[in-house]
Image (cartoon, rainbow, N blue to C red):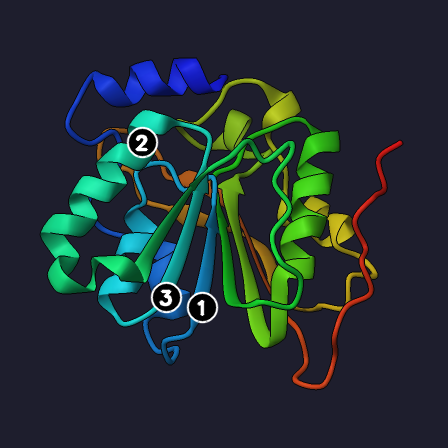
């Protein structure tokens, strides 16, 4: 789906996704001290907003103007005088390159794209993780198509935690956990299967730029 298609989807209802954070984002970040977070493919900003409510300085990036407008409106309602904790950037991840070694937490939740683009985004995200920081990737797992429920039905945009681990190899991150995880779905006959990867950069390590150069 391109940005226009997502704009139309977000315009059809008040919230496409839940108002609260993704369950895996909440699990990982609930006990972390506030810092700087980058939320890539942020959509309506649910994860970035939740983190901003908890004191984080959040940067949310998405290519949907409608999704980001909704995040801006929600920030005004939920953050009040602290609405400036949420910074919104409209950008296509094909072109966006975050600052290196900048963020204490980088979140990518359900970015379902073809493998070449996925690898480029994952490596840029890994480069953005500051010393002592974490990268969290959650996606519809490849096994979800046959054994789970919901999510895209195109195997070309599904992937595993192992795929992400391979994407960020030699990016200076240590894999903390890489596994499929089951997520209960109220409307489905069986659980969804998510790819879950958590990786961290040691305190003393800074990155060489691992992103592929463009001609």
Q: What is the spatial separation of the Cα atoms under label 1 and label 2, in whole angstroms? A: 21 Å
Q: Secondary structure at mark 2?
A: helix
Q: CA distance from mark 3 to mark 1?
A: 5 Å
**In terms of sequence position, does the residue under pointer 3 or pointer 1 come before the other?**
1
What residue sits 63% from the left and 60% below the top? Answer: 128
Q: Which residue is mark 3?
A: 57
Residue 91: image x %, image y %? 51, 34
Nearer to the camera, 185 or 37: 37
Secondary structure beneath disc 3? strand
- Disc 2 versus disc 3: distance between alpha carbons? 19 Å
10 Å neighbourhood of mark 3: few (<14), some, or many (≥20)? many
Looking at the image, do the residues carrying marks 3 and 1 touch, with CB atoms under 8 Å apart? Answer: yes
Give SS at disc 1: strand
Q: Position of residue 208 (x, y in %)?
A: 82, 65
Ranked by sequence position, the earlier of labels 1 and 2 is: 1
Which mark identifies residue 36?
A: 1
Looking at the rendering, which quadrant does residue 209 occupy? Answer: bottom right
Quadrant of image for the C terminus? top right
Q: Is residue 169 above or below residue 202?
A: above
Q: Quadrant of residue 150?
A: top left
- Residue 22 appears in the rendering: no
The answer to whether residue 128 is visible is yes
Q: Closer to the N terminus: mark 2 or mark 3?
A: 3
Query: In the displayed structure, does residue 99 sit left or right of residue 6?
Result: right
**Left or right: where 92 falls relative to 7:** right
Label 1: how many residues lie within 10 Å, few (<14), some (14-19) or many (20+)?
many
């Amino acid at each position: 789906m391109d940005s226009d298609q997502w704009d139309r989807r977000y315009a059809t209802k008040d919230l496409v996704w839940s108002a609260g954070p993704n369950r895996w984002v909440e699990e990982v970040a609930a006990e972390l001290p506030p810092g700087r977070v980058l939320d890539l493919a942020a959509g309506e900003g649910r994860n970035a907003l939740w983190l901003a409510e908890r004191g984080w300085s959040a940067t949310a990036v998405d290519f949907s103007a409608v999704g980001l407008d909704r995040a801006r409106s929600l920030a005004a309602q939920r953050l009040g005088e602290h609405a400036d904790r949420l910074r919104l950037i409209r950008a296509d991840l094909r072109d966006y390159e975050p600052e290196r070694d900048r963020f204490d937490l980088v979140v990518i939740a359900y970015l379902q794209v073809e493998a070449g683009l996925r690898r480029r985004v994952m490596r840029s995200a890994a480069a953005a993780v500051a010393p002592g920081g974490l990268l969290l990737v959650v996606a519809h797992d490849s096994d979800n198509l046959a054994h789970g429920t919901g999510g895209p039905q195109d195997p070309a945009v599904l992937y595993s935690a192992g795929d992400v681990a391979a994407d960020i190899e030699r990016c200076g991150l240590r894999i903390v956990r890489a596994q499929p995880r089951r997520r209960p779905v109220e409307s489905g006959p069986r659980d969804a299967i998510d790819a879950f990867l958590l990786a961290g950069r040691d305190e003393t390590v800074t990155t060489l730029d691992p992103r592929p150069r463009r001609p």
